[in-house]
Amino acid sequence: MLNKKNMIIFVIIITPMVFDFLSKPLAQTRFGGINIFIRTKSKESLFNLPIKLAFNYLNQFHPQHLFLDTSSTRYFNIKGVGLFYLISLPFLLIGLFYLTKIPLLNWWAFGWLAISVLPGALTLGPPNVGRILMLFPILDFITALGIVIFLKRIKRQYYSINKSLYMLLFSSVVIIYGFNVNYFLRQYLIDSPNRFFSQWQYGAKQVAQYAISQEHQVDKIIISDSIKQGYIYILFYGKKDPVWLSQLPNKIRHSFIGYQKFGQYEFRDIDWIKDQNLNRALIVGTKTDIPKKNTINSILSPTGEEL
């Protein structure tokens, strides 16, 4: 329960964020750019929005990305592996069933489940791990509850009668979990870096480091929008001081997230016909942005492909 002290702390923390959100036009906020309402025509919204919202909401619980495969799940992308181990599914179902028998706990657990996926349900695009992070603690809790109940039941039923059978069942759970962990690590550390290097923004770090190394050699550095949120990598790997950024007079915010320009840097689409005539400028882009004959430095993917 929230007491008065906790409520005051919560209000103090949330107030600056609320003022920042309200001080900008909706179109210039992150939510304004990604919510499911922005592409719905007003005449159709009365009929389409409830259906669209319901579909999007239920899609966050789709077993495909929860337990089987996250190839199309943003910010995770691992083939043959879900956000949760497949072995966890029966224990999750046991935990869910057990929760229905505990009135003081089930409203809290099911309420958490219900609101945890709202950020994903209200926004565009395929399931996004970053938007359903609050789903992880509650599903892990319910799964752990299911495991404890399962082990207690088989211990009560078999331990006193047949200890060997009990140990076999217990060991089977451990071994299957171990297999799941091993398979996940193999897919995450070996397969995915080669298969999903584009989705994982491979090369963005190298791009930023090279651009930073050239700051004193050129007057302007243009980084293609093909490198998503390229400004983040410049600020992070360049160890740019937030005070330095806040005091820059010529910075330009992006329409709803990040920056289009600060200091020497511009973050935008490359128009090679015009941009190739710029003096003392470094142009950073993908192989589709800059003709190969004009490339002075390239970054290769883990598979040897030029990015």
Image: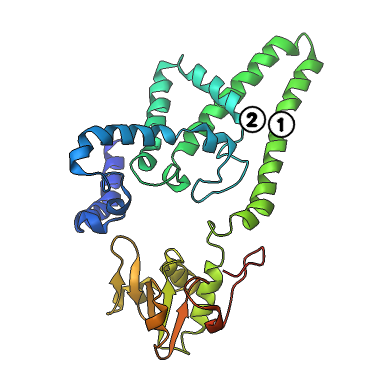
Q: Amino acid at mark 1?
A: Ile
Residue lying at 49% horizontally and 79% vertically, measured from the top left: 212
Q: Position of residue 111 (x, y in %)?
A: 37, 28
Q: Is residue 39 left or right of residue 110?
A: left
Q: Which mark is residue 291?
A: none
Which numbered disc, 1 or 2, marks the residue that appears first in the sequence?
Answer: 2
Q: Is residue 287 left or right of residue 230?
A: right
Residue lying at 57% horizontally and 80% vertically, measured from the top left: 297
Q: Is residue 98 left or right of residue 1?
A: right
Q: SS for tag 1? A: helix
Q: Looking at the rendering, which quadrant does residue 156 occupy?
A: top right
Q: Amino acid at mark 2?
A: Ile
Q: SS for tag 2? A: loop
Residue lying at 54% horizontally and 22% vertically, measured from the top left: 93
Residue lying at 38% horizontally and 23% vertically, measured from the top left: 107
Q: Which residue is mark 1?
A: 176
